[in-house]
Image (cartoon, rainbow, N blue to C red):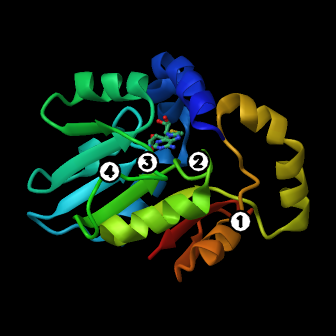
Amino acid sequence: MKNSWNRFVFQLWVPFYDASFALYRKNKEWRLRAFEELGLKENTKLLDVGCGTGLNVPIVPKTVDYTGLDISEAMLNKASQKFPDKKFVIGDACALPFKDGEFDFLINTYSVNVLPDVAQALREMKRVSKKTVLYDHFRSGNPIVAFLQLLSKPFGFLLGIDTFVSIEKELKKAGIEARIEKLDFLGAYKLAVF
Ligand SMILES: C[S@@+](CC[C@H](N)C(=O)[O-])C[C@H]1O[C@@H](n2cnc3c(N)ncnc32)[C@H](O)[C@@H]1O
């Protein structure tokens, strides 16, 4: 997805975003699974890439120094209203405005298949953080599911997402070795750790 399209689409999502995720049954379970895998430690620095309205913030322990980054000013305005004491930065996941190794941990939930250059963003995540956990809806290894994902691309475009992104191919392109775990039986939602 292009950043200009993402800014436009996610601005439209803002009024409904939190309510739509509240209805999404697996949402809470997978967020907790990602944080369990991350293994946050006290007094460390965490970057939340594509943080949106800050749905991960309540999971983060108070002693962790949290920074949320997103391309959408509208999503970040909502996040700041909800969590005025937290740091939120406007920026592009493909060109993170941080130094090498600046963060101990990095989380990315549902903000990979939206990116204009996934491999470049993966390289950036690896550069700025010692450990990254991400999960999103990706191309399934099951050919029937993958075909349906291909057919649904135009609908996904309207929502700002591309579920036909192959995380395995993008990690390979980025030169990153990761452990990948399937979160659902269709093999479409996947978590990666590197
Ligand atoms: C589906 S939302 C996920 C938000 C949040 N991580 C969550 O778990 O609810 C995708 C987010 O990615 C952001 N995004 C899209 N392109 C981006 C980019 N190039 N850099 C950073 N964030 C981006 C969008 O603005 C949106 O807030």
**Circle on res. 115:** 2
Which one is earlier in the sequence, the residue at label 4 or at label 3? Answer: 3
Q: Which residue is mark 3?
A: 28
Name the spot of residue 100 as percent of width and height, x first: 28, 68
Mark 2 vs 1: CB contact within 8 A: no
Quarter of the image for the C terminus: give it: bottom left
Q: Residue tagged by mark 1?
A: 187
* Mark 4–mark 2 distance (CA, rounded to whole Å): 16 Å
Q: Quadrant of residue 159?
A: top right
The local secondary structure at tag 4 comes to: loop
Which label lies toward us, 4 or 2?
4
Kind of residue at badge 4: Pro
Answer whether labels 3 and 2 touch (C-beta < 8 Å): no
Between disc 4 and disc 3, the foreground one is 4
Classify mark 2 as within 8 Å of ligand 1 or not, answering yes or no: yes
> In terms of secondary structure, where does tag 1 sit?
loop
* Inter-mark Cα distance, 3 to 1: 18 Å
Residue at 71% x, 65% y is 187
At which x and y percent is residue 62? 11, 50
